Structures are given as C-alpha cells and as structure tokens.
Amino acid sequence: LEFVFPAEAYLSADAQRAIGLNDVNESDGGVGTWDWQTWYTQVFQVLFVIVSYSCLFINLWCTHQCVVNGILGPGLALRGPAGSVDRAVNTIARQCGLVFQLFELGVLLFGISLMLYGLVFFGVVAWLPATVISVLLVRATYKSIQNVITLLW
C-alpha cells in the first residue's frame, strides 16, 4: 500500500527552511495551497489508517478475550471451590457477550476500512457499486446472525 502524496509539500518552503531542510522547492506553499481533491485524498487516507488500526486492535483484543476465557473458564469450573461451576458459567456467559460485541465492532470497522480504501484509491466510480453490493451483503449477513442468535442465545 502506497499513499498518495500531494504535489505540494506538507510544509511551505519557508517552514522547510526554518527546520533546516536543504534542497527546498521554492514553489511549495504547504497545506494552504492544496486544492479540495488533495485535501480529500489526504483526509481519507488518514481516516483509512485510523480505522484500519482500530479494526486490527479490536479483533486482536477479541481474540485475546476468547483465548483467556477458553483457558481460565473451564479451569475454574473443574478445579475451583464449591459453587465455582456457576460462577464460571456466569462469567463465561458475560464474557461471550462482550467478545461478540467486540467482534461485531471489529467487523464493522473492517468494512468501513475497505470502503475508505476503495474511495481513496479507486475513486467514486468504482467505490459506489462496490459499496452498494457490500452493504447488501452486510445486511444479509446481519439478518442471518440475528436468526442464529435468536435460536441459540
């Protein structure tokens, strides 16, 4: 993944000289000279990075929670003092709800990340039909998940 850098530098020529950079292009006006398309690209690239990092972190957190619950929960139920089975089952049930919500948030952020990527790197013409199809698939997936939750939860 390579980001699209603006034709104009981020800093003006004066600011570049002030921080001691050599080979300054005198025509650089910095962010104040960017047109709307450059601003659009730069802002959406930053949003893409923020959403992608958030998605990865939340999914890693979800995975960590699953592993910890899978390892510690049965141990408490099997080797704990009297009444620990009920405590373990109740704790695991609460944690399952938290993990499921984290997972849903991670998947949602992943979808938003894909949409931002398409918008920045492929333009609106390719982004719009892909987003419409993705939203329809997400809707069908959500309905399917809700049916399973209704049956099992």
Image: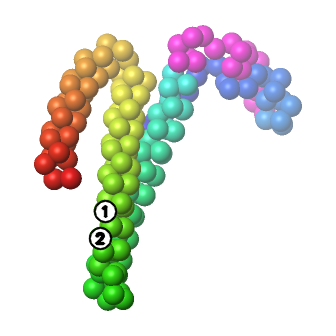
Cα gap from disc 2 to disc 1, whole angstroms: 6 Å
Along the viewing direction, whichever of 57 and 70 lies nearer the viewer:
70
Reading the image, the residue beneath label 1 is 93
Left or right, 30 with reference to 112? right
Badge 2 amino acid: Val
Badge 1 amino acid: Ala
Quadrant of the image occupied by residue 71:
bottom left
Callout 2 environment at 10 Å: few (<14), some (14 to 19), or many (20+)?
some
On the question of residue 27 being in view, the answer is yes
Residue, x 13% and y 48% (percent of image)? 151
Q: Work out whether 61 lies above or below 134.
A: below
Quadrant of the image occupied by residue 61:
bottom left
Q: Position of residue 105 (x, y in %)?
A: 38, 43
Indicate the secondary structure of the residue bearing disc 2: helix
Please say whether residue 131 is one of the residues in the magenta stretch.
no
Reading the image, the residue beneath label 2 is 89
Along the viewing direction, whichever of 28 and 149 lies nearer the viewer:
149
User: Which residue is the extreme one toward the right?
Assistant: 18
Residue, x 44% and y 41% (percent of image)? 52
What residue range appears in magenta?
22-40
Please say whether residue 26 is one of the residues in the magenta stretch.
yes
Left or right, 104 with reference to 4? left
Contact between labelled residues 1 and 2, with CB atoms less than 8 Å apart: yes
